[in-house]
Image (spheres, rainbow, N blue to C red):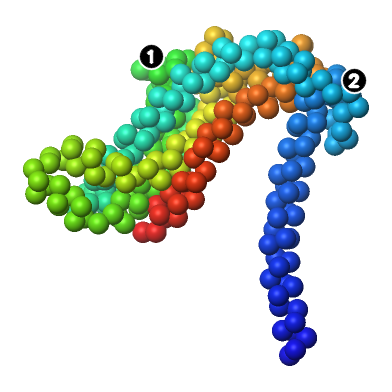
Amino acid sequence: MRAATGFSPLRRAARPLLVLLLAALAVGVPLWLVLATSAKPQGEAVRPHLDPPRHWQPAANYADAVSQGEMLRGFANSLLVVVPSVALVLILGAGAAWVFARRSSRLVTAAYALVISGLLLPPAVITIVMELRQLGLAGTRPGMVAVYTGMYLSTSVFFMTGFIRTIPVELEEAARIDGAGPVRIFLRVVLPLLRPVVATATVMVMLYAWSDVFYAFFVLGGGDGATLPINLYQVASAQLYLNNWHLVFAYVVVMSLPMIVVFLVAQRKIVSGITSGAVK
């Protein structure tokens, strides 16, 4: 009994260390491979490996990736697609979640179940493309915004509905007694309290949409409207980037920087938003 008791503190300390070690291997090894290869000259990067660069040239590689890969145009296209998508998901999701959280009829329950079914049912790509062609939105940024909004709206509604249910109804009733209408109650009372879950939904939608290749390939295709992931696919398969892994990985690093910044800024509210939104 004493021996088992003596080993229990050691076991408790070993578990988090084991988790950290596994996380370091799962995340750190691929991350080091990308960073190290992006700083190597072409001769060292022909076959990517974990050895550190013998000759460091990250500045030249990143400059070539930005100029030759047309990253500025891809960055602008990604912003023109992702930012409106996030705004629509947050606005529509917050409004719908408020209704779902405060009303309890059979129709509202059925509508909520239909909305969050998007968490389980994958979008049908062929159907989406055909509908966009019928509407004249195929190959356009508004069409891509509509696709992203429809895809990620269910996630936003799910988290926000659970979060709003934790907000005391008395706050809204007090504002209603003071003469505030539904729009004012939503903007002045409910929406400011949704900051943690709004930050969570913003980061999640931005991460998904910013790195999406599959749906952007079918909806936007190539050309002048290509987003960063599509642009990376095009330049990586072009003659210029064949065997130029140092430029491909440099492109990946630069493309990931905006999302890293967004995550670092909103990381404090992400966990609280997830846990609060999943309470009920």
Expressed as whole percent of the image width and height from the top left, the position of residue 39 reads 80, 25
Residue drawn at x 71%, y 44% as measured from the top left: 27
- Is residue 121 positioned above or below 60 on the image? below
Screen quadrant of the C terminus: bottom left
Q: Nearer the viewer, mark 1 or mark 2?
A: 2
Residue 14 is tagged as: none
Horizontal relation, residue 276 to residue 260: left or right: left
Q: Which residue is mark 1?
A: 136
Residue 127 visible in the shown view: no
Residue drawn at x 56%, y 32% as measured from the top left: 261
Horizontal relation, residue 52 to residue 247: left or right: right
Camera-side residue of 138 and 253: 253
- Is residue 72 positioned above or below 187 on the image? above
Mark 1 secondary-structure assignment? loop
User: Would you call the spot at circle 1 few (<14 residues within 10 Å), some (14-19), or many (20 or more)?
Assistant: few
Q: Which residue is mark 2?
A: 43
Camera-side residue of 102 and 18: 18
Mark 2 secondary-structure assignment? helix
Sequence-wise, the earlier of marks 1 and 2 is: 2
Name which residue type carries label 1: Gly
- Is residue 237 positioned above or below 95 on the image? above
Residue 202 visible in the shown view: yes
- Is residue 180 positioned above or below 88 on the image? below
Screen quadrant of the N terminus: bottom right
Name which residue type carries label 2: Gly
User: Would you call the spot at circle 2 few (<14 residues within 10 Å), some (14-19), or many (20 or more)?
Assistant: few
